[in-house]
Image (cartoon, helix red, strand yellow):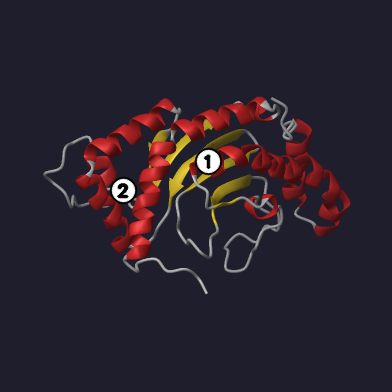
Amino acid sequence: MEYNYKGISPESIELLCLNRFNDSKPFYEEHKEEIKQGITVPLRQMVLDLSDLLYEIDDKMYLDPVRAVSRVARDTRGNRSKMKYRENMWVFFRRYKKEYPEAPFYYFEFYPNSFGYGLVLWTWRASNIRVLHKMIVEQPKRFMKAVKACADAGFSFECRDCYKKEMYPDAPEELKPFLLAKNYAFSYNSFDISRINSPELINEMKLAFDIARPMYEFLLEAHTRMMNEGLIKPEE
């Protein structure tokens, strides 16, 4: 199949790193078009190439290629690091953020020497995550099938923050790591950065995202419950 995405070259990644190293608006302006064509445009093409599958998974996906891709220039307001430019870039494949805050999403990201993709649910309120925990306890077989689907997709479970105290001490042992989690990430990561310089990456991501669909559906159902209960409200 012919894809829009042709890859991100080592030279483009090197230029992105040089831009970060110089941290200079004149340097950025001089190389802005090269960075756009070498980095930003391919990532936007990635969104286009994955859109059909993602719409099939969730017809409410908001896949604007411009908005889905991170900016090279950083917003330094309220940030300890005052570096103006980034050397890592990402794409979020998700519902419209203002209408569906904190909804689960697929993602792709790369750094100078690594890349990754996967499926994430970030919500920072304990009341929200308890809704998901309750669903896991109510539907353990369905959830563990979704966990297996993620493993089949090549994803590993990661949690940035966990509760120290068990809230479901009588739950099956296989569920406990998930019932302690405050956020959820099912991710694949690789240090073979050369692999993003090929349209074959699109086939790889399409297959993984599709296989992991049961987990996306589970997380999305939990998010819908959170919204129905008024725990998450659309932004005005």
Q: Mark 1 and mark 2 in contact (Cβ < 8 Å)?
A: no
Whichever of callouts 2 and 1 sits on the residue coming sooner in the sequence is 1
In the rendering, at what x and y percent does residue 236 appear? 52, 74
Q: Quadrant of the N terminus?
A: top right
Q: How many marks?
A: 2
Residue 207 visible from this viewpoint? yes
Q: Could you tell me which residue is drawn at 76 percent across and 44 percent down?
A: 41
In the rendering, at what x and y percent does residue 31 appear? 85, 48
Which kind of residue does numbered mark 2 sit on? Answer: Ala
Q: Is residue 209 left or right of residue 38?
A: left
Q: Could you tell me which residue is drawn at 73 percent across and 40 percent down?
A: 42
Q: Could you tell me which residue is drawn at 49 percent across and 33 percent down?
A: 210
Q: Which residue is mark 2?
A: 181
Q: Which residue is mark 1?
A: 56
Residue nearer the viewer, 2 or 92: 2
Residue 159 visible from this viewpoint? no
